[in-house]
Amino acid sequence: MRYAIIGLLLSALAAGTALAVYPSQTITFAGGEAGPVAFSGRHHGQPCSRCHNPQAFPRMQQGAEAITMAAIDEGRLCGSCHNGRQAFASKDNCQRCHQSQ
Ligand code: HEC
Ligand code: HEC
Ligand code: HEC
């Protein structure tokens, strides 16, 4: 498993594509009128396929999947965890994601 992940990272590097969201890295989504959302690798150490699968974020490329608050609140995308069980719920915690709020 470890070697498979290393292989994946190496092939991403070899292809010259964007790097993975490593623990030290953060990608920032614009977040519309609610303000920017920082998605940090530090909080998200789950297996890649937990998020990079056909139901959630199929491509390892920021912006590939349109993320809406409606989808999150229905328990899809970020909301498959941010539902008050696996991680804090989306509904009452706007400012934990939208940091300018
Ligand atoms: C908790 C969910 C989650 C996990 C786990 C996860 N990712 Fe991602 N990753 C995302 C999201 C969300 C995006 C942005 C996708 C989009 O906008 O469609 C992303 C984007 C990326 C990108 C593109 C970054 C950029 O700057 O465009 C790469 C490369 C990537 N992930 C690699 C990985 C690898 C390799 C693993 C496993 C070691 C992994 N991800 C685990 C959620 C996750
Ligand atoms: C595989 C499950 C999973 C997915 C999918 C996921 N998260 Fe998380 N997230 C977590 C866990 C677990 C934590 C840390 C535990 C906690 O505080 O509830 C966390 C923490 C965070 C934090 C840290 C907030 C703080 O106050 O410390 C932010 C911000 C965040 N997630 C945003 C997102 C966004 C944005 C997405 C979708 C692009 C996303 N997460 C998708 C599981 C997930
Ligand atoms: C788990 C993290 C998370 C939480 C909690 C969260 N959001 Fe979001 N929100 C996002 C992400 C990711 C996007 C998409 C950003 C992008 O693509 O630019 C988004 C987008 C939005 C948008 C613009 C797009 C749309 O679909 O309307 C609004 C408005 C918004 N959120 C409001 C809220 C409000 C209000 C709350 C609290 C009730 C909230 N958000 C809680 C992550 C979160």
Image (spheres, rainbow, N blue to C red):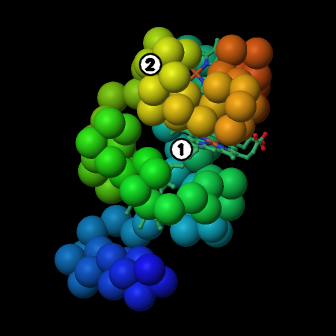
Residue positioned most to the bottom: 3
Three-letter amino acid code of the residue under disc 1:
Thr
Q: Is residue 91 rendered to the left or right of residue 81? A: right
User: In the image shown, does 15 or 45 lie closer to the viewer?
Assistant: 45
Residue at 50% x, 15% y is 74
Question: Residue 8 placed where, x, y %?
Answer: 33, 77
In three-dimensional space, the C-alpha distance between marks 2 and 1, rounded to whole angstroms, equals: 18 Å
Q: Dot 1: within a 10 Å radius of its alpha carbon, few (fewer than 14), some, or many (20 or more) residues? A: few
Q: Is residue 78 rendered to the left or right of residue 96? A: left
Residue at 32% x, 36% y is 55
The residue pinned by badge 1 equals 28
Indicate yes or no: mark 2 CB to ligand 3 under 8 Å. Answer: yes
The residue pinned by badge 2 equals 71
Indicate yes or no: mark 1 CB to ligand 3 under 8 Å. Answer: no
Question: Residue 57 placed where, x, y %?
Answer: 35, 43
The number of discs equals: 2
Q: Dot 2: within a 10 Å radius of its alpha carbon, few (fewer than 14), some, or many (20 or more) residues? A: some
Looking at the image, residue 29 lies above or below residue 44: above
State which tag comes first along the sequence, 2 or 1. Answer: 1
